[in-house]
Amino acid sequence: MILTSNEIAKNIDSGNIVISPFDSKNLGTISYKFKLGNKISAIKKTLDSKEKLDLQFEDIPEQGYIIEPGFLYLAQTYEKMGAHNYAQQIFALRDVGSSGIFIHISADLGHSGAITQWTLEITTGHKIKLYPYQFIGQMIFWVLDGTRLCYDGEYQDMPHSLPSKYWKEFA
């Protein structure tokens, strides 16, 4: 089951869901609308899955940042979000998706206990300009069935978007 906006609000009040900063105007019928942060890293080179990737982040200027097809951009949500007793999932807003922007490639599901600024894996079908703090996605909260296990992995409370750690498979 997915939580409704009323249940999301109740769980924010009780501390079971964390969204910071929170604005009740961003609650949809079953989701919370979130913003893009103000930093981005463009990955425009061939990657070697055996090598560590060092990212260079830059500010997204107020006049916007153009993303291009064929590249991966890592950014972060403006809000710190997550839940102690629910799984979370992010999606692009409908208007973002219909503009040809994907905000995640594969990492759209968060474990219970994962509360952080989420890494966005942004790709696009054509050139488009993004702006800092613009609305970009929505988060939904799933009820868990069974014994709850909380996330305590290395991605908790990330200071910024993290690159792939796929290279560790070979270490």
Image: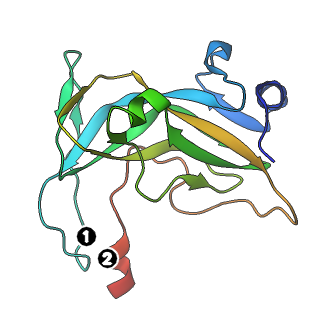
Camera-nearest residue between 15 and 133: 133
Disc 1 marks which residue? Answer: 52
Location of the C terminus by quadrant is bottom left
Q: Does residue 40 appear left or right of residue 139 in this picture?
A: left
- Check the image and name the residue furthest to the right: 146
- The foreground one among 43 and 99 is 99
Residue drawn at the location 88% of the way across and 65% of the way down: 146
Residue 91 lies, in percent from the top left, at 52, 42
Q: Which of pointers 2 and 1 lies earlier in the amino acid sequence?
A: 1
Quarter assignment of residue 126: top left
Residue 22: x percent and y percent? 63, 21
Task: Check the image and report above or below for 110 versus 58.
Answer: below
- Can residue 136 be seen here? The reply is no
Reply above or below: 103 against 9.
below
Whole-percent x and y of residue 45? 11, 60
Label 2 secondary element: helix
Question: Label 1 is placed on what type of residue?
Answer: Lys
Seen at 68% across and 34% down, the residue is 18
Q: Are marks 2 and 1 in contact (CB under 8 Å)?
A: yes
Q: Is residue 24 visible?
A: yes
Q: Read off the residue under disc 2.
A: 167
Question: On the picture, is 131 further left or further right than 138?
Answer: left
Say what amino acid the circle numbered 2 marks. Answer: Trp
Tell me what residue is drawn at x 81 percent, y 32 percent.
11
Q: Position of residue 141 (x, y in %)?
A: 71, 43
